[in-house]
Image: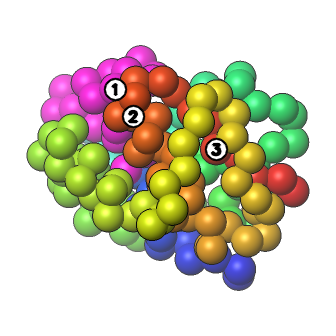
Amino acid sequence: MPSSPVQILKLRQLVGFLGERAQFGWWPTAFYEPSGRLFLEPIFSKTPQVAQYHGVVEAARRLHDEHLSIGAYHLFRLTEEIEQDLHVLVQTAAEEWSPAVLYRDKQTALAALTDLTSAAKKDGVGPISIGDVRNIAGLLRDIASVYRSAFLSGTPSFPYLAG
C-alpha cells in the first residue's frame, strides 16, 4: 500500500474530533462527547468506539462531498484499497486512538494537529488541491496544515486529492 493507514487514521480521527459540534462545529455531530458514547453503547455494546468513528467519518464525508467535485478524494473519502485498510485498522485499534481518549479538549487536539503539520504552512478557503491520492503518504502533513489553518481562522477548507 502506498500510504500509512495508521497515520491516515490518526489524522482522520483528529480532524473528525475537531470538526464536531463541541469543537469547531463544521458538522453537527457529538459522537465523541460523553453523551454520544452513552447513546451508542446500548445499540453497539461491543463496538461503540467503531460506531463513533463511522458516525463522524460519514458526517465529515458528506460535508466535504458537498463542497468538492464528484470524483475528488479527500481525507474522508479515499480509494477503496485505503478505505478497506482503514476499516480493518479501526476494528482493532479504535479504542486506543479514539479522540475521546487522546484529547481532553479542543486546545489539546489543536496542539496535536499542529504537531502533524508541514513546515511550509498551507492554507486557503474552500476547496484546496493538495496533490495526487497516490502520493497521500507524502501529503498528510500538507493536509493537516490546511485543516489547522482552517480551524484557527474559523473558515472551513476542504483539501482534496486528484485521482
Residue 72, position as x, y percentages in the image: 81, 43
Determine if the magenta segment contains residue 18.
yes
User: Depth check: 128 or 67 in front?
Assistant: 128
Quadrant the C terminus occupies: bottom right
Label 2: which secondary element? helix
- Residue drawn where x is 51% and y is 62% of the image: 120
Residue 111, position as x, y percentages in the image: 24, 53
Label number found at residue 151: 2
Residue 34, position as x, y percentages in the image: 16, 33
Q: Is residue 51 visible?
A: no
**Residue under pointer 3:** 159
| Measured Cα–Cα span from mark 3 to mark 2 | 13 Å
Label number found at residue 24: 1
| Measured Cα–Cα span from mark 2 to mark 1 | 7 Å
- Residue drawn where x is 48% and y is 24% of the image: 155
Could you say which quadrant of the image residue 52 lies in? top left
Label 3: which secondary element? strand
Amino acid under disc 2: Phe
CA neighbours of label 2 inside 10 A, class few (<14), some (14 to 19), many (20+): many
Q: Mark 2 touching mark 1, by CB under 8 A?
A: yes
- Mark nearer the N terminus (2 vs 1): 1
**In this view, the mark in front (2 or 1):** 2
| Measured Cα–Cα span from mark 3 to mark 1 | 17 Å
Could you say which quadrant of the image residue 63 lies in? top right
